[in-house]
Image (cartoon, helix red, strand yellow):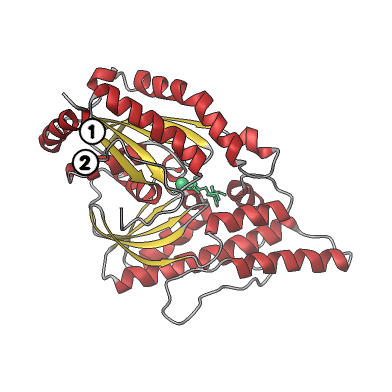
Amino acid sequence: MGYIRKATEKLERFKNRHDTRILAIETSCDETACAVVRNGREALSNVISTQIETHKKYGGVVPEIASRKHIELIDYVVDEALVGAKTHLGDIDAIAVTMGPGLVGALLVGVSHAKAMAFALEVPLAGVHHIEGHICANYIQHRDLEPPFVCLVASGGHSHLVHVKGYGQYKILGRTRDDAAGEAFDKVARALGLGYPGGPLVEKEAQKGDPGAVAFPRTYLEPGSLDFSFSGLKTAVLNHLNVCRQRGEAVNTADVAASFQSAVIEVLVDKTIMAAKKCSTDTVVLAGGVASNGRLRSEFESRCADEGFLLKYPSKLLCTDNAAMIGATGYYRLRRGLMSTMTLNAVASMEIDSY
Ligand code: KG4
Ligand code: ZN
């Protein structure tokens, strides 16, 4: 029997079953990750092999090296995820994989592996949007969380405000017009000589500094706009460093890190609260690598408490790239009958609300 017929039959069963296991793969950037997810909500395993040490010496991710590393690692990571979940290949009901956005060569490794597995096991395949994955990480962390809610997705490549109206129903309320929040952290870290990846290093440095030391700009754009812009802030940090150097003044790295971090966080919090009010939702959700920032979390905690919003965010492990979030997303797509075929391809740039 042909693959499509068999997978379609299994998809119909999947939609009605109460005990399902998805094997999910994520290779969009510099983490090779695989997870086994039960019923879209429980990560039986969540294996992440990071390439940070490899890319560190170049000051950022080198796409070609990332692809090669994924090829070297993927078999081991998949095996470890199966063993960790005490699950045999024959118990896998479906395969989910990040199809984009991301580095196309890196994505292709995961997509090819996932297609081969789905074909060999004759199970349905779900191509998943990476940012949708970040949002759905919250379904793993908070098993009772249901849409609707407003979600801030702040990662290395994206800063989005999304109204999550239902499973798979997204309205983009705002997005960055230039640098993503995480990208700004990474660029400022490089300028401060802190290294890569920037976010956690800036956060650590900022703990020793005064957030009010340097008055960096907060960019709000037009009144009522829910878009972001962080390139002006990044330039202001670079200018501040140049002026200090030209005057022969010592740079207080901790103060600059703390002042920069506080400027980013203030705008992210203000705009997210604005979005939640606009959508009349009572729940604010955070996602993406930047959401693992402790200061960002505590600022959100206090603002949400003041304004009467319920706040949810994932564990640090589920904030940054992982495959459990892709399994959760794939689960809800397959439940809605959205199955990918063997023509599934990696897509470097794609929209969350139109795939
Ligand atoms: O979501 P993610 O793992 O990958 C992308 O999809 O981009 O996010 C990575 C980004 C990087 O820019 C990193 O510097 C940032 O998240 N990040 C942080 C923190 N941890 C990671 N930014 C601020 N504070 C952190 N603690
Ligand atoms: Zn990500």
Q: Quadrant of residue 227?
A: bottom left
Q: Is residue 351 visible?
A: yes
Q: Badge 1: few (under 14), some or many (20 or more) residues near its Cα, within 10 Å?
A: many
- Which quarter of the rendered picture does the N terminus lie within? top left
Percent position of residue 255, x then y = 70, 60
In the picture provided, is 227 more to the left or to the right than 184?
left
Q: Quadrant of residue 47?
A: top left
Q: Mark 2 near mark 1, Cβ–Cβ under 8 Å? A: yes
Please give the label number shown on residue 105. none
Q: Is residue 64 above or below residue 202?
A: above
Q: Is residue 35 visible?
A: no
Percent position of residue 336, x then y = 17, 46
Q: Badge 2: few (under 14), some or many (20 or more) residues near its Cα, within 10 Å?
A: many
In the picture provided, is 290 more to the left or to the right than 282?
right
Element assignment for label 2: helix
Looking at the image, is mark 2 or mark 1 nearer the viewer? 1
Percent position of residue 7, x then y = 19, 31
Q: Say which residue appears at 51% left-offset and 68% top-offset.
A: 177
Residue on which the image places disc 1: 124
As shown in the figure, which amino acid type bears the numbered disc 2? Leu
As shown in the figure, which amino acid type bears the numbered disc 1? Pro
Mark 2 to mark 1 CA distance (whole Å): 8 Å
Q: Say which residue appears at 84% left-offset and 63% top-offset.
A: 245
Whichever of labels 2 and 1 marks the residue nearer the N terminus, that label is 1
Label 2 beta carbon within 8 A of ligand 2: no
In the picture provided, is 355 more to the left or to the right than 3?
right
Percent position of residue 75, x then y = 44, 22
Element assignment for label 1: loop
Please give the label number shown on residue 334. 2
